[in-house]
Image (cartoon, rainbow, N blue to C red):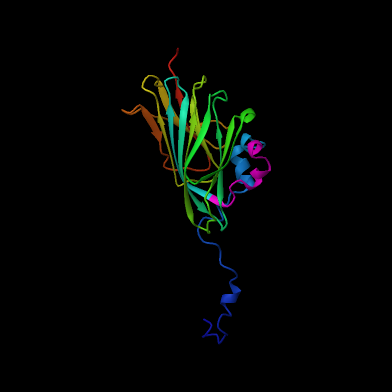
Amino acid sequence: MESILALPTGALRSLLGPHRPRGRTTAESQDLTASQRVFGENSVVERALGAAFAHFNEDLHTLVIHETLRLDEHRCIRSTAVHQVLRATRSGASRFTVVHSIDDTTAESIDVVIRCGKPGTVRFVPELRSLVIEILFGRELTRNETAMIDYEILLGPSQLPSTHHERRTRINLREYLLHVYFHPKALPVTCYRYYREQIGAAQRSSRRIALDISHSAHMLPTRCPAGVHGMAWDWPAS
């Protein structure tokens, strides 16, 4: 068109303005609004992190989460293993922070084993029943670079039976897999998955899950939007 109109090279292109960003990075930026939409105002996560909540993993996007839970014969969670794939939304990301809720603060011990990544600050906030774990990558990531983290939370004997497990995400995930192993001597009578748009909201999209031959149940949503994805189970009457 420029040659037909006898215009200098680039004259028309200059009228188009800057390119719009491609991909999903901009739409999935993890800002304070997205966090509060799922966690709620003055949430446990916000109180556990304090001032750092405003910048909570703001330069990282979670793509895939696989979680494996193991319960003991007393119906208590003894371990939670997490495998997670992350992508940097901008250059400079060097660490990732997770906040886990602990069912029973009187568990005899709480240990964290990090197998992929380096341990940073790990602290337990008993009044909030929260475990805050910082995992270091060992270097700064470049924009769109991916990283893997792999860690496990080991709990000592507890007196409070567990009835559910939830994963809270403020962005859409590509994949979320939750796999729960029950002890052969302590099997639930029912097990089901559910979704909530935010903490405290009513459960919806509930669906029953059958135990397999290994006394385990799993959920793998075909879609994993922002919100709360959980699995719950009912124990037989004592």
Q: Residue 153's spot in the image, x, y percent?
A: 49, 34
Q: Residue at x 42, y 29 (%)?
A: 70
Task: Indicate whether 209 appears above or below 33.
Answer: above
Q: Residue at x 45, y 21 (%)?
A: 75
Front-lying residue, 129 or 219:
129
Q: Residue 191's spot in the image, x, y percent?
A: 42, 26
Q: Residue 11's spot in the image, x, y percent?
A: 58, 80
Magenta span includes 121: no
Front-lying residue, 81 or 19:
81
Front-lying residue, 61 or 209:
61
> Which residue is outermost to the top?
238
Displayed quadrant of residue 83:
top left
Left or right: 194, with 52 as reference point: left
Magenta span dominant secondary structure: helix
Of the 4 image quadrants, the one containing the C terminus is top left
Task: Indicate whether 183 appears above or below 54.
Answer: above
- Which stretch appears magenta? 46-60
> Which residue is outermost to the left?
213
**Is there any visible trace of residue 106 in the rendered image?**
yes
Q: Residue 229's spot in the image, x, y percent?
A: 49, 36
> Which residue is outermost to the right?
51
Left or right: 44, with 203 as reference point: right
